[in-house]
Image: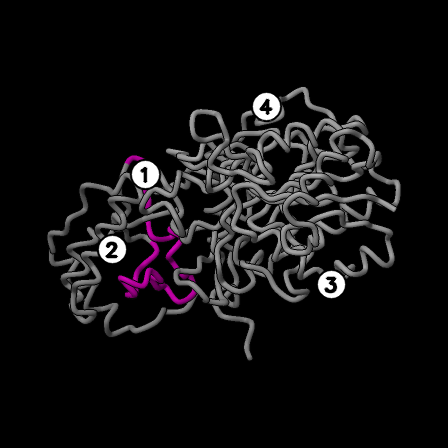
């Protein structure tokens, strides 16, 4: 696997999460209705507001939940680019990270 | 000669447009090469008023043979079961349908609305619409579940919104050439030759489906439309990627999710906000999985596929 896209931004996000940034990891959007609401809220942010994106989408730098879900299994994750392809996020990620917009 | 009558109930004329766009054979070919005598059609019929009524009565009486009775659109029963909201040739259309179906050698429902009610029958169904022999997935419809045409076949359902021109003409040609009895129908009375495979069969995005790479916006050439954009290709029976539209493309090839329009439940979820063009999930897992796959198998398959996806699967490989 490659180092992934945008190493500078990747480091910024890694540092933010490692510093204990509190994000809205709960509640998980149970259905599309809640998912769409979060995505709509994300679209109101400045695309460069990385911290805002991380907080709103509930980012964590480790797997989460009873089944240890992680980016690696998410449909938006591009494994070779190590990238979240959800248009509202579009950020570099690591396979063992997680956010509440996780979908399989 | 094969006498064909085409009537239209609660419809948008989409299937008529599709039929008139047929190319191989064309509507003209049906007449000149296959001996089809189009007695009347909403866009082609010459008779009007008394002459049309007279022709319809002659068919009902049996004096003129009705070989193929094609119906497009729903049977409208409103208000209060009278059918008065859809009058045709001097009486409710539903009364003509009832009598003509009894004398027809073959009865063919063209499009979703005639097959199972389609969009007009979506709740709250103000027109009390129903398909010829189904209402959504419930067998029965307007003619009743025991209905058989004189050729001893139930209504032949050719669904779609609209049905593809070739699906329509090939069924008509099969009947006109004496092969009607060979038509094999599935449990929803659709010709198996068209409706045994899935919309996904032949989709150019199958590689992205296999490696679990999702399209996230309409029109993207990269990615599968099933995971995020509500594509119903993996669980919809149709040949849309085998018998191409306009001989060159399909919805999914063009980046538009399959809406599942050949299935009785179309339009799915009664068009509730947020249900169209968005894959419905529960706790992150799709509610409707590809046909034949259970939730556990899906999770295993997806995790493995994602982990083994090659680099190229993440790129747009259809470079102009």
Q: Chain of mark 1?
A: B
Which residue is farthest front?
B50
Please check whether the numbered discs 1 and 4 fall on a single chain: yes
Instruction: Give the Cα distance between marks 1 and 2.
Output: 16 Å
Residue that label 4 marks: B140
Give SS at disc 4: loop
Residue that label 2 marks: A39
- Within 10 Å of disc 3 (Cα), the crowding (few <14, some 14-19, many 20+) is some
Could you tell me which residue is drawn at 46 percent across and 46 percent down? B303
Instruction: Give the Cα distance between marks 2 and 3.
Output: 45 Å
Residue that label 1 marks: B283
Q: Is A93 part of what is drawn in magenta?
A: yes
Evaluate whether residue B242 shows in this view: no
Task: Mark 1 or mark 4: name the one nearer the start of the chain.
Answer: 4
Task: Please tell me whether residue B164 is drawn above or below residue B105 in the rendered image.
Answer: below
Q: Mark 3 touching mark 4, by CB under 8 A?
A: no
Q: Which residues are magenta?
A: A66-95
Instruction: Give the Cα distance between marks 4 and 2.
Output: 43 Å
Q: Chain of mark 4?
A: B
User: Which quadrant of the view contains residue A18?
Assistant: bottom left
Give SS at disc 3: loop
Query: Closer to the camera: disc 4 or disc 2?
Result: 4
Where the C terminus of chain B falls, by quadrant?
bottom right
Could you tell me which residue is drawn at 53 percent across and 65 percent down? B254
Q: Position of residue A97 (x, y in %)?
A: 28, 53
- Within 10 Å of disc 4 (Cα), the crowding (few <14, some 14-19, many 20+) is some
Q: Position of residue B98 (x, y in %)?
A: 64, 28
Query: Closer to the camera: disc 2 or disc 3?
Result: 3
Could you tell me which residue is drawn at 84 percent across and 44 percent down? B2
Q: Is B101 part of what is drawn in magenta?
A: no
Task: Mark 3 or mark 1: name the one nearer the start of the chain.
Answer: 3
């Amino acid at each position: 696997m490659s180092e992934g896209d945008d190493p500078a931004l990747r480091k910024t996000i890694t540092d933010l999460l490692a510093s204990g940034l509190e994000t809205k990891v709960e509640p998980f959007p149970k259905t599309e209705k809640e998912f769409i609401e979060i995505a709509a809220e994300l679209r109101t942010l400045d695309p460069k507001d990385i911290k805002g994106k991380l907080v709103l989408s509930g980012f964590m730098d480790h797997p989460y939940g009873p089944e240890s879900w992680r980016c690696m299994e998410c449909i938006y994750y591009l494994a070779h680019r190590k990238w979240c392809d959800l248009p509202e996020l579009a950020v570099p990620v690591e396979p063992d990270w997680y956010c509440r917009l996780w979908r399989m | 000669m094969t006498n064909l009558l085409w009537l239209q109930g609660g419809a948008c004329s989409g299937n008529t447009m599709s039929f008139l766009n047929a190319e191989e054979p064309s509507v003209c070919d049906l007449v000149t090469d296959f001996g089809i005598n189009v007695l009347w059609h909403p866009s082609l019929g010459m008779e009007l008023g008394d002459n049309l009524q007279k022709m319809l009565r002659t068919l009902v009486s049996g004096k003129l043979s009705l070989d193929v009775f094609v119906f497009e659109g729903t049977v409208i029963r409103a208000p209060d079961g009278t059918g008065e909201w859809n009058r045709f040739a001097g009486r409710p259309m539903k009364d003509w349908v009832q009598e003509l179906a009894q004398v027809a050698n073959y009865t063919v429902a063209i499009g979703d609305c005639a097959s199972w009610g389609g969009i007009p029958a979506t709740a709250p169904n103000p027109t009390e619409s129903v398909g010829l022999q189904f209402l959504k997935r419930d067998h029965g419809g307007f003619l009743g579940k025991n209905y058989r045409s004189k050729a001893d076949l139930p209504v032949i359902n050719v669904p779609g919104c609209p049905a593809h021109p070739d699906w329509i003409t090939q069924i008509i040609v099969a009947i006109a050439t004496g092969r009607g009895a060979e038509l094999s129908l599935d449990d929803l009375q659709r010709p198996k030759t068209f409706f045994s495979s899935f919309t996904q069969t032949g989709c150019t995005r199958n590689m992205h489906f296999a490696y679990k790479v999702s399209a996230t916006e309409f029109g993207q050439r990269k990615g599968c439309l099933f995971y995020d954009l509500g594509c119903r290709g993996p669980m919809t029976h149709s040949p849309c990627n085998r018998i191409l539209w306009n001989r060159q493309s399909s919805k999914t090839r063009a980046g538009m999710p399959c809406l599942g329009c050949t299935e009785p439940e179309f339009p799915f979820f009664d068009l509730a906000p947020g249900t169209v063009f968005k894959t419905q999930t529960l706790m992150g897992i799709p509610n409707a999985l590809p046909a034949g796959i259970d939730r556990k198998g899906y999770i295993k398959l997806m995790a493995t596929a994602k982990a083994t996806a090659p680099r190229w699967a993440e790129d747009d490989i259809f470079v102009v």
